Amino acid sequence: MREPVLVTGAGVVTPIGQDLDSFWAGLVTGVSGISEIERFSVQDLRVTRGGEVKKPRAESSGPGAPAGHREKPARAVAARGAPPASRASRFLVQAAREALDTAGCRDGLPAPPARIGVVIGTALGGIDEAEHAVRGEGGLRRLAGALYDGPTQDLARWLGATGPVLSVSTACASGATALGMGADLLRDGRADLVVAGGVDVLCRFVQRGFNVLRSLTRDLVRPFDRRRNGLLLGEGAGLVVLERRRDVAARGHRNVFGCLLGHGSAADGVHVTAPDPDGRGLEVAIRLALQEADLSPAALEFVSAHGTGTPANDRVETEVLKRVLGRRATAVPVNSIKAHLGHTMGAAATLEAIMCLLAGRHGLIPPTLNYGEADPQCDLDYVPNAARRLQPRVSLSTSLGFGGCNAALVLGMP
Amino acid sequence: MTPSHEAPATVDGGEAVRVGDGRRAIRIPVTAARVPAPRVAGVGLLTGWGEGRAAFEGAHPNGPRGLVPVPTPALVGERFRRATRECLLAVAAARAAVADAGLDPASIGGERTAILYVSATGYAAANRAFLEDEGSTTLHFPYTSPSAVPAEVTIEMGIRGPYVNLMGGATAALQGFWYGARWLTGGLADRVLLVAVEATHEVRDLFDRARRLYRGPLVEGAACLVLVPGGAGDLRWASGLASGGSVGPTVDAVLGAVLRGSRPAHIASGASGARFREAERQALARRRLEVTVRKEPGEPLALAPLAAMARVARPAAGSLVTATWKNDYGALCWPRGSRG
């Protein structure tokens, strides 16, 4: 097994909660963050609902200084000029505050700026800025923010990080790939601390796009249910602080969320939007992640599935998990939190990884909501509708994205 | 814990740099990632100046200002009917690289071939089209995702190996070299297709507004390198964000981390902007080195390091390729004998 990389901090912005405590409480009690979209015009669209973050803290009191928050991040953030312009960047900054707090870095980072890396996954980048930019609004700053790496650069600037900065875009698998690459930066000695995760925001661009694709449901999101007929989009950010075990021990930090044991990615090579009907790429990604973790499938005690609620995705994932887990397949609980949050795209995989670690910490597995009718093609244990008392020591998180992107993470307890 | 700007005692690399009036040493602890170097087995290069390295190298440094477009490759077939120009360029570059490597395209498929896609702008045209045309349909939307571009390559060749897309300019391409070499070293793949595409013609007015971000003219193109195991020595990659007074120390620290005493015979600079170029010149001069490969007469963004490597990786002596994107400065030191 390669050098263990620990998750020492985490922070979230989600439609069901804008900190870890409310996120977790919402997950286990079955709160849905799906609502009518209010922030942009959707009246002409077939589907007008999504997992929208109402009143983000970073906006309610001005970016860079949320009300009541202990404003002492790693660096003198507020002194670094104007706050990030884009909603994605503000989500990242908000999540980063919590991630640094929980990592015990409230008063400063335990490494010099050049040793701090930032890796952000996103399916849309600064697309909400692009909506303004193509209308000719704003200057160079808005245009630069519209690029895919705009939010990553904004977060690095906010953190005062001057080490490696990577922007990953493997569509809806981005948040998993970002965590894997962040761990590799640590293993290769390019950084001593990495802030990694994913972000994406709801905007008319993406809501209209998925409407055009007719991927959205007018019903509830029902992962793995026989009646499932589509997904709903969501928005949010998830960030983790990654460090090598020896560095964590050296600074005496004890509040560790867990370990990132392995990750893998693989292409489908089949279709731009639809998953490979045989799930071969996803299976490769899972096996690569297990190989990196030096674990066999027998070690897996819980699976956080991508579970979008589309007919194809959920069937393919089920088939792949049955192949990977073999006879144990029906004994390993599998959940999807897409019905809680909507599909948060680039943030989804990171939020699901954080959920896995919280499940290990609290000894509870959040349920798959809106599950009522079993599908013969989806015949695993999906933890329907109620949280289950179980403390997974090793979890698998799977992700699939446009372009045939597949990614898998293996996570463990410290 | 207080953030420190001084080098911690445990830093295992990096450079100590004395700047300003010399009274205070700013130490920027940059360490290079080291990974066994791959070999460049094949190159596919299409730019606005023509196809292949010769056209690229023959471009006149005083060529046209503005944007140099690249002709759309004529790829036939129903599957390509809906694909964007970026997708067509990527497939054409990948086909050319595979042919240059002497590989049978039918042998590329499967899980032993990995793909890494890098781009700064390879999604902009489709995104703009979808943003501006409320009546548009799926002809645009799935192709607004950057991952649609490498997806067409994976579909064309049946690739099911490791897969990452990195967005950013030329520094993202250096990250791609590192990660591709890592996959090969880890035994995750037998070969890596490193693909870059930049197509800006449809959004040239937007890029005209952003000219401060790059040196012109913008040159469209697509590049693909086939990386395989078997290079000599270790490939070293490092990068750092710099602004204001930290440009000089950052450039010096990054170069110090990747060079570590080696003296590459070929140095291809991709530094943009007067401050980065001058800082790089000074940092190289301190090591009695200088840029040996003239800059391309234009800005091919993420293509630049691939094109540079295609030009310098064949010689028997080592190479250094540098790049900037916004305020990110990166360098890649490639040992000798990397082109086979």
Image (spheres, coloured by chain):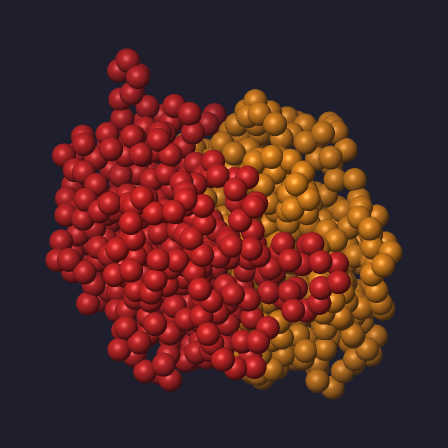
Chain colours: A orange, B red
In this orientation, does residue A289 appear? no
Q: Which residue is at the front of the view, A24 or A204?
A: A204
Q: Report which quarter residue B14 is drawn in.
A: top left
Q: Which residue is at the front of the view, B327 or B35?
A: B327
Q: Which residue is at the front of the view, B150 or A250?
A: B150
Q: Is residue A331 left or right of residue A250?
A: right
Please name the residue shown 51% across and 54% down the image.
B201
Q: Is residue A315 left or right of residue B253?
A: right
Residue B23: x, y in percent?
Answer: 28, 13
A288 shown above or below B244: below
User: In the rendered picture of this protein, how many numbered marks are placed on residues?
Assistant: 0
Please name the residue shown 72% across and 73% down the image.
A310
A160 shown above or below A389: above
In this orientation, does residue B340 appear? yes
What residue occupies the far bottom of the structure in this picture?
Answer: A376
- Quarter containing the C terminus of chain B: bottom left
Residue A296: x, y in percent?
Answer: 47, 73
Residue B84: x, y in percent?
Answer: 55, 66
Q: Is residue B129 left or right of residue B252?
A: right
Q: Is residue B117 left or right of residue B226?
A: right
Please name the residue shown 48% across and 51% down the image.
B120
Residue A284: x, y in percent?
Answer: 48, 74
A377 shown above or below B268: below
Please name the residue shown 76% across and 82% down the image.
A375
